[in-house]
Image (cartoon, rainbow, N blue to C red):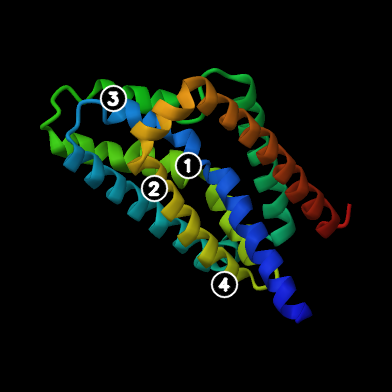
Amino acid sequence: MSLLVSFVVSLVAGIVTLFVILDPVGVIPFFQALTRGATEIQRVKIANRAVAIALILLLIFAYLGDVLLLVLGVTLADFEIAGGALLFVFAVRDALSNEPLGASETQHAANQTPDPSAMLSLQTVAVIPIATPLLAGPGSLTTVILLGREQYGLIISGVAILVDCALAWIAMRMSNRMTRYIGPSGLMIIGKVMDILMAAIAVSFLAKGIVGAGF
């Protein structure tokens, strides 16, 4: 039973950790801006494409991350320190700025979508910046590699990716309703809380890396 409890706790922790980094709620304002002139069918296609690409990228990094580290000659402690520092910078930058990570790319892409019927342009927006860097960005890619190195890591990272990508898809599909009920201010508050949690997770990664490196 203790093994089962340990697995469940690790699984929940993995899902929550990736959810915080992925921040599907924080993506809603950008998805709304990017698809403001799209039809409902186009919005569904954009959400499907964005989540599918983010899912593939995250799974590749989760299951081939060790190979990547080996090829680059990077130790896990090195990656934890670098990843933790990167996450911390993102969290602080996001918390102190009125322009969250990826906002510039999102606004530029939105401005480059002059015609709602221009599906090619909209599908490009689904890839950049929604799929990456807003969903599968440096923070989430780093997180799935590190989750894969924990106990039950490969199972937990795979399930966490599937669950959180599904939640991101639901958030985009329900973005109109969520924006109407929560409001822009509510979404901003949720985003800032996510930033604080992201910073705490980054500190945890840094601490593990420093201990692993023998400092």
Residue 14 appears at what percent x and percent y?
63, 59
The residue singled out by tag 1 in the image is: 24
| Residue farthest front in this picture | 181
- Nearest to viewer (mark 3 / mark 1): 1
**Going by the image, does 81 lie left or right of 134?**
right
Residue 170 is tagged as 2
Q: Say whether residue 153 is visible.
A: yes
Displayed quadrant of residue 28 = top left
Q: CA distance from mark 2 to mark 4?
A: 23 Å
Look at the numbered discs 2 and 4 and tell me whether their residues touch, using CB distance below 8 Å: no
Q: Residue at x 69, y 45 (%)?
A: 84
Q: CA distance from mark 2 to mark 3?
A: 21 Å
Along the viewing direction, whichever of 149 and 194 lies nearer the viewer: 194
Q: CA distance from mark 2 to mark 1?
A: 9 Å
Q: Tell which circle, 3 or 4, labels the residue nearer the N-terminal end.
A: 3
Residue 35 appears at what percent x and percent y?
26, 31
> Dot 4: within a 10 Å radius of its alpha carbon, few (fewer than 14), some, or many (20 or more) residues?
some
Residue 155 is tagged as 4
Look at the numbered discs 2 and 1 and tell me whether their residues touch, using CB distance below 8 Å: yes
